[in-house]
Amino acid sequence: MENVKHILVTNDDGVMAPGLLALVQALRPLGKVSVVAPDHNWSVAGHVKTLHRPLRVKETKLADGSLALMCDGAPSDCVALAYMGLLSEPIDLVVSGINPVPNLGTDLTYSGTVAAAMEGVIWGIQSIAVSLDGPHDPQQQIDFSPAAKIAARISACVLRNRLPKGVLLNVNVPFLKLEEIRGYRVTRLGERMYHDFLVRREDPFGRPYYWIGGDPPSGVPEDGTDIGALAAGFVSITPVHMDMTAHHFLSRLQGWDWESPAVTS
Ligand code: MN
């Protein structure tokens, strides 16, 4: 008999987020699923390593009654803790999500969902981040089940094929019924455009404060990119390398005149 795979599920929306429960339930047929997730929402918190305070972990129950661990650290802390001894069994796969909004292009640098997968990769564990291109209305009930089914299919594929060292998969699923989704596209990261603006107001004591607001980001729906695939109704699967070196610029940069004095008189 093949040995049972151990899958760690986490997210950045908090352990009680419905996207996490849908993911856990869809992954159960693939092996043993453990949950270590943050006790509150860490969306857009990026990659965090909490070193300046202790981390606390509590047992909790998901809405289906299953056991989960919640931690007062960031999503990336949850993965690090799980790997470094919180869970006794080795982890075969980290799946982070399902985030209710997409993570595309430079969103990856802000995303707690993706940061959790990055943490997994740093520790040598195969990792996937899954996001849904969900509606922006926070009141709307979201059906995560198509995205959860797709996440399970992609997870099984990763377990069968193995990802190379230092590579995670960033998955984005269109907000469609399963039968409406047109298929899978392996993509590169596209170009995101942010529409943030800065609001300056005064607090009750007359001191200024600043708040970043704005509409959700848009993007260039170019062919071959994550943004293009999602806009066309495909599941986008981007292999993301942790080596952020600008390889295409290395040799040109080497040709710069580094020895020349800063100021010429
Ligand atoms: Mn989130």
Image (spheres, helix red, strand yellow):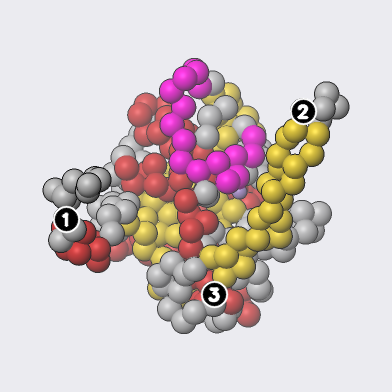
Task: Determine contact: label 1, label 2, CB under 8 Å.
Answer: no
Residue 11 showing in the rendered view: no
Task: Residue at 48%, 63% (x, y): give it.
Answer: 105
Q: Residue at x 40, y 70 (%)?
A: 188
**As drawn, 31 above or below 81:** below
Q: Give the answer, above or below, for where 25 lies relative to 146.
A: above
Residue beneath label 2, please? 207
Residue 232 place in picture, x, y as percent: 57, 81
**Relative to 2, is 255 above or below?**
below
Q: Secondary structure at mark 1?
A: loop
To which residue does mark 3 refer?
A: 220
Upstream in sequence: badge 2 or badge 3: 2
The question of residue 158 being in magenta is answered with no
The residue positioned 39% from the left and 51% from the top of the image is 127
The residue segment tinted magenta is 40-55
How far apart are the alpha carbons under marks 2 and 3? Answer: 39 Å
